[in-house]
Image (cartoon, helix red, strand yellow):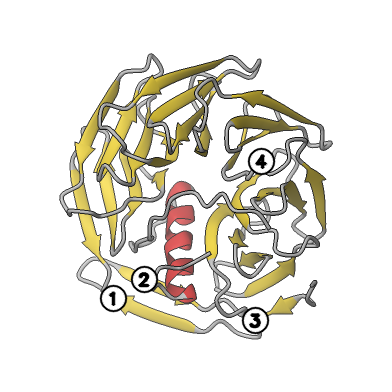
Amino acid sequence: MQCLGRSTSFRLSLLMILALAAIGVAADRTSAAVEPPRRALPTRHPRVQAPAPALNVVEGPSAKIFEYSVPTANSGPLAIAAGSDGALWFTEADGNKIGRITAAGTITEYPIPTANSEPYGITAGPDGALWFVELAGNKIGRITTAGAITEYPIPTANSAPYGITAGPDGALWFTEVNKIGRITTAGAVTEFTIPTAGSDASGITTGPDGALWFTEFSTNKIGRITTAGAVTEFTIPTAASQPLGITAGPDGALWFVEGAGNKIGRITTAGGVTEYTIPTTDSQPFEIVAGAGNNLWFTETDKIGQITTTGTITEYPIP
């Protein structure tokens, strides 16, 4: 995966900030580069551990950014989640590894058994393990906090899984090119077809209504799927907005980014959509997460954005 001109340490600092914001830790702001879902198809290496974090600290007027270098060069860190062990776990799309970083910055990497698997989304599971998708490997992976990896094949060939989240039913739910998948902690996979063809389902999150909500990158919609598999779709007002990340907000609505629309969207559980324009032109928002209070945080190309539940946006430049 291309980092679009951003260094590995830069992207990891970004990912840590989003994860820390999600668990309510006071962290600071940085940014991510947007790119559309890459739906391309496809040796093992010894476990690598950083002997000591390569630490860079940059202070802004109201921010302090800590950057940590990933041991594997050009590893392409992409997604991150808080683990049950108090550490943060991240995917290395180009390095074909799962990384673990402590709050002190110590990084451990675990190679994925399937070569060139392209791990993308990752989330904490209800079983205490981390679950991730293998976009090119066409599998769902599970890694324990001790680093043991198990892989489960997806029934649909070339499904290109992208995002994953823990569902309200004790299973994991993930997006495919035109399906939503469900995998139990025992590894049983069920797939549900999205009504609109060519949707390129991307981000996914559990909503406050007990359903799963997801973005349709190529068909400009927000989807909702019940745990029984019933899908409803809602069209985004801005045409060709290319929605990507989505998260449940503190106000009972779902919030999402529009990568091409240059907006932050809010959708109620009844399907009402409101959009807020990001002040910076062509900011290319990529991910979004709920933070402390009534704030949500999102990534831009060179900034971190904050939006309140009333729609007020503040942006923090990267030093």
User: Which is nearer the N-term, disc 3 or disc 4?
Assistant: 3
Please name the residue that numbered disc 1 is placed on.
59
Please name the residue that numbered disc 2 is placed on.
65
Q: Residue at x 25, y 45 (%)?
A: 262
User: Which is nearer the N-term, disc 4 or disc 1?
Assistant: 1
User: Which is nearer the N-term, disc 4 or disc 2?
Assistant: 2
Using residue 47 as the reference point, say whether residue 65 is left or right of it. Answer: left
Please name the residue that numbered disc 4 is placed on.
159
Q: Separation of disc 4 and disc 2 at Cα? A: 37 Å
Using residue 130 as the reference point, say whether residue 150 is left or right of it. Answer: right
Amino acid type of the residue that numbered disc 3 sits on in the rendered structure: Ala
Please name the residue that numbered disc 3 is placed on.
50
Amino acid type of the residue that numbered disc 2 sits on in the rendered structure: Ile
Residue 202 point in image, percent of width and height? 51, 40
Residue 260 point in image, percent of width and height? 30, 46
Residue 114, above or below 184? below
Q: Separation of disc 2 and disc 1 at Cα? A: 6 Å
Q: Separation of disc 4 and disc 1 at Cα? A: 42 Å
Q: Separation of disc 1 and disc 3 at Cα? A: 24 Å
Amino acid type of the residue that numbered disc 1 sits on in the rendered structure: Glu
> Does the CB distance between marks 2 and 1 fall below 8 Å?
yes
Give the SS element for disc 2: strand
Residue 141, above or below 215? below
Q: Residue at x 49, y 54 (%)?
A: 19
Q: Separation of disc 2 and disc 3 at Cα? A: 20 Å
In front of the other: label 3 or label 4? Answer: 4
Quarter of the figure with the C terminus = bottom left
How many residues crowd around disc 4 within 10 Å: few (fewer than 14), some, or many (20 or more)?
A: many
